[in-house]
Image (cartoon, rainbow, N blue to C red):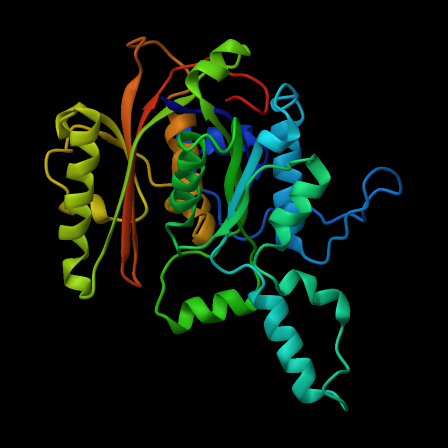
Amino acid sequence: MDTVISAVSLMSPAGVGVGPFREAVRTGTAVPGGPVGDFHVAEPPATGRAVRLADRPSAMALATIGTLLDGGAADRCPPARRGLVLGSAAAGIDQSMTLTRDSLTRPRPDNVNPALVPACVMNYASAQAAIEFDLRGPNATVTAGRLTGLAALRYARRLLAAGRSDAVVCGAYEDLNERRVAIAEAAGARGVPAEGCCAFLVEPGERAREHGRAVLAEVLALETGVFADPGEAFDVLGAAVGRALRAAGAAPSDVGLLVPAGREDARLPGLGKARVVRPAELIGDTHGAAAAFQVAAAIVADAAGTGDGDGRLALVTAVEPDGHVGCCLLRTRRQGDNKETGT
């Protein structure tokens, strides 16, 4: 079974929607990172399903998923067969630290804001999205640092392969707050802090074509590895890339687009002819959402123009300093400019 991405929705420091991000990727125009400036958390509507939002990251996730599904992408899929996999590297940390501080500094330990409690739970956003959009299938939240987007995509692919879902909404999100920035600085992380959310509709290729959705990218391989010594990171990543290429029956020279998280591509042999796109240098460091934006960049970078009808190979790579590496090999399809849920 071929697993494909048939719809994309996102918001980034470039703006709300695929369009501003696509423009940044295609032109190489960098934005100064930071927050999604034209997104504001609104009160839940008075009608419809009651959804309580206590935090900005959950609001971003719901807005992005809502746009993804707005065109009826999941309408022909029974609610119990609609899966959801969301990821974040720092979800709930800001709220948890606020509660901890308040319990220590206020007159009584229990004198805290109870509205913050739900948002401290890692799966708060995915639970709210399931309620709001009637996603009654498997519901999971994953975290893997900078590889979170790839971990979510791999989880979605396994749900489809196991027959647990007919279609999966998959993505990653991260908000920008002072505590996250302070933690990153203490860890020695470099880069311009940024926030954003990226969501995909992942389904079997046959189902996408049956329902008239364009195949934006086929997920050919997802490989990961771990290392104990930072000096081993590039060797472990190189081995993971090798496995991914072998699984797809491809050679390094077949890769036409390379989307690295940082500068790890300098240590990967045989990829010198590939075009390189670095989302972190275009929109900033989105931390747990970074790998999802890399996948989105691979899709929008090849979204228009002429070329081989079979598409071209795009390789996404990432290194998490805590000891985790990963890569994703995609076959992207050149498409015309479509509305939000396409490219």
Q: Quadrant of residue 277?
A: top left
**Is residue 144 left or right of 182 when viewed as pictured?**
left
Query: 130 and 266: which one is in front?
Result: 130
Q: Is residue 200 above or below residue 151?
A: above
Q: At which x and y percent is residue 38?
A: 66, 43
Query: 162 and 124: which one is in front?
Result: 162
Q: Residue at x 28, y 46 (%)?
A: 326
Q: Is residue 51 above or below residue 116?
A: above
Q: Residue at x 17, y 51 (%)?
A: 236
For the N terminus, the quadrant is top left
Q: Residue at x 63, y 67 (%)?
A: 95
Q: At which x and y percent is residue 241?
A: 19, 39
Q: Is residue 60 above or below residue 201?
A: below
Q: Is residue 319 visible?
A: yes
Q: Residue at x 77, y 52 (%)?
A: 52
Q: At which x and y percent is residue 50?
A: 81, 46
**Is residue 307 left or right of 112 when viewed as pictured?**
left
